[in-house]
Structures are given as C-alpha cells and as structure tokens.
Amino acid sequence: MTRTPRIVIGILLLLCLCVMLGIAFWPTPVDADGRTTLLAILDRLQAAGAPDWFDYRFVESAANVVLFIPLGALLALELPLRLWWIAPLTTTLFSVAIELGQTLLPERVATIADVYANAAGGLLGATIVLVVRLLVAGHGRPRPT
C-alpha cells in the first residue's frame, strides 16, 4: 500500500477511536435523551406486526455491532493480509477495556453481551476487508485452462 492511503487509513482510524471512546465513556448512556422516543417507535413497530425479538435490547446490540465494524475494517486494512486476524482480536480486547472502564462510571453498565456484540462487529469489519483483499489479489492471477 502506498503512503497516501496509509495516512488516510491512519487518520480514519484515529477519528474512529475518538468517536468510540467518546461514546463509550460519556458519563451517561448516549441514548438517554432518545430512549423514550425509541421505545415508542419500537412499540408501534411491534403493534404493526414486527416480531417480539425486535426490541430495545436487539436495537442496542445491533448498534454495538455496527459501531465496531469500521474499527475492524480499518485495522484489517492497516495489517498485512496474512495478519488480518489480529484486527478482530484487537477489537475484542478494546471492547473488554471499554467495558472495564465503564464499571468506573456510575450511570453506565458494563455487560458481556456488549463485548460479544462489539467483537462480532470487529470480526465482521475485518472479514469484509479480508474477502475484498482476497478477491482483488486473486483477480490478477491467470485462470487455469
């Protein structure tokens, strides 16, 4: 990879980490102001036929997955292809550190479910990058006849 894309990836990685740390260590839950509205929307969706599992806990878990996809992807882009697996490992360890840090905040709750969701997001982001890189690398190879 040339120098310019590496710098861009590094800047995006730094921005991603800053946003994630801001969300993770905000003194109150980041959805506190919108929770009532979100619950009302979910109630209406369920009244309209949405499945019972599509509830606040599901939305919160999905948000945790989505939050970690960019981090997993950016880390995988920074690593050599053969070391792609370090990206989801790093995102999982980062998630554990965040959850441990949240135990120090009186209005925040640390859960293992968040670690699982965050780890899934990091793995998903890294896997997407892995697949794309393998497809691009294999695209230049001659096909057997």
Image (cartoon, rainbow, N blue to C red):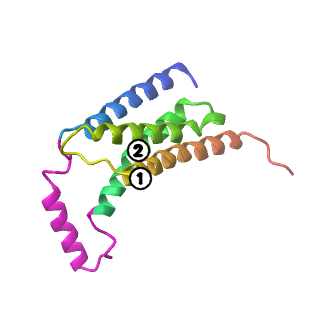
Give the image location of residue 99, x and y in percent: 34, 42
Q: Which residues are magenta?
A: 28-56
Read off the residue under disc 1. Answer: 117
20 left or right, relative to 94: left
At x 40%, y 44%, the residue is 68
State the residue in front, 37 or 5.
37
Identify the secondary structure beneath mark 1.
helix
- Does the magenta run of residues contain 80? no
- Residue at 15 percent across and 51 percent down: it is 32
- Left or right placement of residue 75 versus residue 83 in this view: left
When asked about the image quadrant of residue 97, the answer is top left
| Image quarter in which the N terminus is found | top right
Q: What amino acid is labelled 1 in the image?
A: Ala
Instruction: Name the residue tied to disc 2.
Output: 68
Q: Residue 50 colored magenta?
A: yes
Residue 47: x and y in percent read 21, 79
Q: Is residue 116 found left or right of 22 in the rendered image?
A: right
Q: Residue furthest right?
A: 145
**Position in image of residue 70 (x %, y %):** 42, 41
Give the distance between the C-alpha atoms of the residues marked 2 and 1, in whole angstroms: 8 Å
